[in-house]
Image (tube, rainbow, N blue to C red):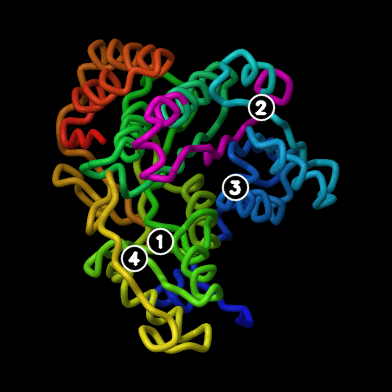
Amino acid sequence: MEKKNISYKELLGRKEVDLKRSSINNILNNKRILVTGAGGSIGSELVKQCLDFKPSKLICIDYSEEKIFNLYQKNYEAKVIPILADINDYNELNVVYSKYRPQIVLHAAAYKHVPIQEYFPWNAVKTNIGGTRNNIFLSDKYLVEKFVLVSTDKAVNPISVMGATKRIAEKIILNFKLKSKTSFKAVRFGNVLGSSGSVIPVFQEQIYAGGPVTITHPKMSRYFMSIEEASSLILECCSLGKNREIFMLEMGKPVNIFQMAKKLIRLCGYQPETDIPIIFTGARKGEKLNEELRMNEEEVVYTSNQKIMILKNTKKDLDMKKFKKSLSKILKAAENFDSVEIRKLLKKMVGSYENNTL
């Protein structure tokens, strides 16, 4: 079957949000910016957009040799510095921070595929929690001005290991020491259209193979945003709010995956369930039918950009002594590949987490 060039934005179900970029220039221009997960879908778009603001250096960290190679192949100007490094290795990361002294850190590195992290929860803990903690500690140590964590709507009342680990990463941001010189923030995303491993490229491959298109459940819905929206939101949040805040984009209504699949089949030039069959395979471990954008205890505060909201937690702060103790325990459990202990500690640290063992 002949492939068509389709704009994923046609599947958003709403007009793409036009984020303000004027305020970003003062924050990023001539700064040393570090991007983790720089070879990924969000990370590579961040690299591209950051260059528009003429940073003095753009330090691009990724654990994948292939992705670092691809960054080299793009023939970026000398200010772009690709580095093959593991964010889970504090000492290795310390060398990078010590050498380049970043002023802005955009932390996009994470394990994100929900069903896979159910099978390998220790990797989700090591990277999504441990890797985040390493970057936070080093940002504080080297007096980084602004640190932005890329989070997910799956962190809200999570039923997956991936979502629970991202919620813990948010909690580290929200409760890091008050006297830090670094402004710590998190950005909570919906699903990003066209990102690696996301549903749309999978559907396209299935369509061009003649079908069937596989959907887990006819009522499954998700909030979606474009890669450009996601990356712009990260950058704009550098210039908004104060400290220890979670930001979220106004993403409209959730999109039904079944209806989205049918629309994509038509955009590819075929008729759903006539030319291309659709089958339902059943929800996988860790998947919700419908995602949520905020928790009950979070109230919405609008920023100067009406499309960007700050989520304020109305509950009292964590008992940090207990939280830090649990943090050490869960990282130890990950080192020991102890999935039972990991899930037990995830429940302790994220009360709304539902322990879905395989």
Task: Specify the quadrant that holds the C terminus.
Answer: top left
Query: Dot 2, how many residues are within 10 Å of its Cα: few (below 14), some (14-19), or many (20+)?
Result: some
Q: Residue at left 32%, top 49%?
A: 153
Q: Residue at left 62%, top 79%?
A: 3
Task: Find numbered disc 4 in the image and state the secondary structure of the residue it sits on.
Answer: strand
Q: Which residue is mark 2?
A: 85
Q: Amino acid at mark 3?
A: Gly
Range of residues picked out in magenta: 97-126
Q: Which residue is mark 3?
A: 40
- 287 vs 354, left or right, is right
Looking at marks 4 and 2 on the same chain, the residue that comes earlier in the sequence is marked by 2
Q: Residue at left 29%, top 35%?
A: 164
User: Relative to 14, does residue 290 appear above or below in the rendering?
Assistant: above
Query: Dot 3, how many residues are within 10 Å of its Cα: few (below 14), some (14-19), or many (20+)?
Result: some
**Labels 3 and 1 touching (C-beta < 8 A):** no
User: Relative to 205, does residue 342 appear above or below in the rendering?
Assistant: above
Spatial distance from mark 4 to mark 3, Cα to Cα? 25 Å
Relative depth, front residue between 343 and 250: 343
